[in-house]
Structures are given as C-alpha cells and as structure tokens.
Amino acid sequence: MREFAEIWSYLASGPLVWLVLTLVAYVTADALSAATGRAPLANPVLMAVIMLALLLWGSGTPYAVYFEGAQFVHFLLGPATVALAVPLYQQGRRLRRAVLPVLAGLLAGSVVAVVSAVWIAGALGVDGDVLAALAPKSTTAPVAIGIAESLGGSPTLAAVLVLLTGVTGAIMVTPLFNALGIRDWRARGLAVGVAAHGIGTARAFQVHPVAGAFAGIGMGLNAILTALLAPLVLRLFM
Amino acid sequence: MIHALTLILLCQLIGETLMRWAALPVPGPVAGMGLMLALLAFSPRIAALVVPVGEGILRHLALLFVPAGVGVVGHLDRLGTQAAWLMLAILVSTFLALLAGALVFLLVARLTGGSLAPGAQDDA
C-alpha cells in the first residue's frame, strides 16, 4: 500500500483530479440549488466556486495547477456562446415581434449599468484607473477585460468585478421582479442578460426558457454596446 | 453529436477569424452565434442536428463559469481598500440596470403593441 500523500501528489500534478473535482463541486452545488427549489441565494456558480476555492486553499494548490484540469470546462464557454443561437432560433417568432422593446431595453439597461456604476464609485472617491475596470462590469468577461485594458484599467480587477456583478444580478433578479409583479419573461430575461451577462443568463435558463433566450440576446448585444459606450461614459466622468 | 459539435466549433472559429480580421470589438463567439443562427434558420436538417446538442450545453451553462470564478477568488484582494465602495456601486448599479432594462422593455412593448395578453407569458 502506498501512502495517500504519495498518490495525491501524483494525481494533483495531472489535469484529471481537478477536472473531476470541478464537476463534482458543480453537481453538488446544483443539487443543493435544486433542493432549495432554486432559491436565488443558493446560486450554483457561487457555491461551487466557494467549495473549490476552499479546497485549493486547504491543499495549498496554486491556481495554475487547478486550471490545468479546469481549462477543459472553461474552454466550453466559447461553444456555449455559439449554442445560444439555439434558443434564439426556437424563440425566433417571439423575438421578431419584440425587436423594438429588446433594443430599447438593451440601450436603457446598458447605459444605466455603466453610468450608475461609474458615477456612484466616482462620487465615493474611487480612483480613475479602478473606474476603468468597473465601467464594463455588466458585460461578459473576455469583452470586459478587453474594454478595461483599452481604458487603462487592470484586467484582473475587471474580471473580479465582472464575476461579482454576475452573481449579484443572478441573486437579485428573481426577488426583485417578483416583488414588482413583472411577469413578462421576455423583459425579465433581457434585463438580467444585459445587467449580469452569462451568470445572469444561466440563472434565467434555470427559471424559464423564454427568459433564458432573451437573456442570451441581451448578453450578446450588450457585449457590443458596452464596447462603444464605456469609453464615452468614462470620458464624461473623468 | 460529433457533427453538431463540429458545426458549433466551426462557427466559433469563423467568428473569431472574421472579428480579428475586421478588428471589430465583437467577441468571436458572439459573431459565431450570429452565424449559427443563420445556419439554423437556413437549414432544418442542421437545426435538427444542432438543437439537442445546443440545449445540452446550455442546460448547465452555470458550470462553465466555475473555473474563472475560482481564479477570481484569489484576486479579491485587488479590490483593495475601496472594496466596500466598489461592492456598493455594483449592488446599486445592478439593481438600477435590471429595473431600467425590464421597465423600458415593457413600456416600449406596450407602445408598439407588442405586449402579450395577460396570462399569455407562459405559453412557451
């Protein structure tokens, strides 16, 4: 019999163990989320991330080693974005009837997301280079990182702010719209896709397929709009 | 399934290539999504092939954000001394953006006559 430590050090140096642990953490988090009846606070992304972060910290594993395994999951973000064409195709008729509301909601949500964040943080005395990383927080991570860099912000900080925004939106959206009595899944989905990108879209798919489809279109269009909008807003406030 | 995956990855590759070539700020996968939408609308055969696989990938969209999320945890200290202010800005701004997006959508839907009859929201 070999020592457990010896087997662990062998396994932990390859990609398999961290890939499996990522999937196990997610499956566990998803089961917990289902057990709470998809309660907003029991967000599966948040729970899985906390579990894995504790595991890395407890085992003293550097992120680079973890990512060797997790990269196979991470890579699927691109194909999943392409796959968002499927719900758009399925909801095509509903979407074509709502072109104007979608564009108006997108513009309103996107402008409010960028302006309010930069204005509030600026008024609280947050520095200009941090504002540059904050401005694109509602858009999907690769786009936000590109925008933040072009504005002189830190890409790492931008990624942190994007994640926090996504989780915030995903937790907030259901209780907020329920309290306001907004029952139109199109409006709910579009708003969360624009305000909270992919993590909000994942939440929308959990709640209703129509909300998911509209969240996907909101996320995709907002990636384009924020790239145009963020530099303008930042110039206004600095 | 392998045919559908090939088509999906091919759309992503073409999207990445086109956007890089045109130097547009649109992410490659988003352009690939547009391309895939055109393919689905163009050919019912492609749709029959891609729809189940696409639905399978999207059913667990949340999983795909986990690796990046774990990476971000290690950088929470980057928020620095302004962490509380940044969190406050994110909370308020996300709240306002959600409100603005949904309310403007509903308003314009009503104005353009595109709003659904009450109770018709759940017919999907």
Image (spheres, coloured by chain):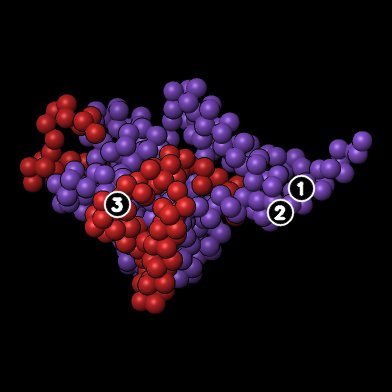
Chain colours: A purple, B red
Q: Judge whether residue A183 can be spotted in this image.
A: yes
What residue appears at the point 42 percent right and 63 percent down from the top-left corner? B10
**Mark 2, residue position:** A65
* Disc nearest the viewer among 1 and 3: 3
Q: Mark 1 Cα within 10 Å, few/some/many (few <14, many 20+)?
A: some
Q: Judge whether residue A194 can be spotted in this image.
A: no
Task: Please state if A9 lies on the left or on the right of A25 as rendered.
Answer: right
* Disc nearest the viewer among 1 and 2: 1
Q: Are marks 1 and 2 in contact (CB under 8 Å)?
A: yes
Q: Mark 3 Cα within 10 Å, few/some/many (few <14, many 20+)?
A: few
Residues tagged by mark 1 and mark 3 found on one chain of the structure: no
Task: Please state if A11 lies on the left or on the right of B45 as rendered.
Answer: right
What residue appears at the point 76 percent right and 47 percent down from the top-left corner? A12
Query: In which quadrant will I find the C terminus of chain B?
Result: top left
Task: Please state if A194 lies on the left or on the right of B121 as rendered.
Answer: right
**Mark 3, residue position:** B45
Chain under callout 1 = A
